[in-house]
Amino acid sequence: MSEVGHTHSSTIKLSCPAKLNLFLHIIGRRTDGYHLLQSAFQLIDWCDTLSLTPISENTIRRINPIKGVPPEQDLVVRASKLLKEFCKVKNGVEINLQKDIPMGAGLGGGSSDAASTLIGLNHLWNLNLDTATLCQIGLKLGADVPFFLFGQNAFVEGIGEKMLAIPPTTQDFLVIFPNQGIATSQIFQDPQLTRDHAPITIEGFIASPKSFQSNDCQAVAVRNCPEVKNALDWISAVAPNSAPRMSGSGSSVFGVLDASNDRVKLEFLLQNLPKGWIGRIVRGLNKNPAYNLVSSD
């Protein structure tokens, strides 16, 4: 390994996977207004692609910026700046992000992009920061960023910062984004949101994951966003027994597929979704593929 501060010379490419909340319970609220959650986060193979190229000038250059997202709100730019300032890096980087995960879908795409940026630049700029330090930086960008830095599926508690690894899975999921986004703040500020779910244990979840398939945000989301209910009904119709539910604060919904579901038929149905909907069959991942590059020296 070269000295800290030495920059690698070539472009690195990283995948930025989405995630599903296999369940989501709200068990309380802190005095500062943050909600206390319990959830299981599952990585899936629906990914954005991030390219990081070192440049000699002391600047962060974003190519192909996302329409309607100014640089000060762009999570990959913000992640780069935070890391640059934290480590007083003198070199720059050119960032190219190809978005495939829908925005505002509750699939964690932006948080994953930010995490992959931190993972990639830690490598590219040869900073040798440990995961705990990256998580401290990541938490400033969003509550889900530490999960993607953690790099594996997790039982998550607190406001998203307490994570314990859960056993690997090879499940397939049918995911639908009904193209009507919901602001997370709108869900969490709703007076009718239940905030007193009885806490469960990670042991309880691992012993019987099928017992925990509810999402406390779902009732509020369905009331505010009729398309969520339409998407849940669509999955129920085409994949019975898949226990469809919403992921995170929405508006994406998903069902768990098993051997009884006809993949070929489902792929055909996905070609004919209602106008504007985005859907696909995805496979669960056990590791964040962004970490695969870190041994590329």
Image (cartoon, rainbow, N blue to C red):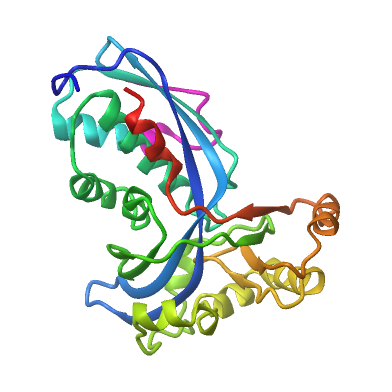
Q: Position of residue 100 (x, y in %)?
A: 60, 40
Q: Quadrant of residue 92?
A: top left
Looking at the rendered image, the quarter that the C terminus falls into is top left
The residue under the point 23% across, 72% down is 32
The x and y percentages for residue 34 are 30, 70
Q: Is residue 129 shown left or right of residue 124?
A: left
Residue 65 at what x, y percent from top left?
Answer: 50, 28
**Quarter of the rendering occupied by the N terminus:** top left
Q: Is residue 27 magenta?
A: no
> Number of marks in the image?
0
Q: Which residues are magenta?
A: 59-77
Q: From what the image shows, is residue 32 above or below residue 84?
A: below
Residue 279 or residue 242, whichever sits in front: 242
Given residues 141 and 269, the one toward you in this image is 269
Of residues 187 and 91, the one nearer the viewer is 91
Residue at 69 percent across and 68 percent down: it is 258
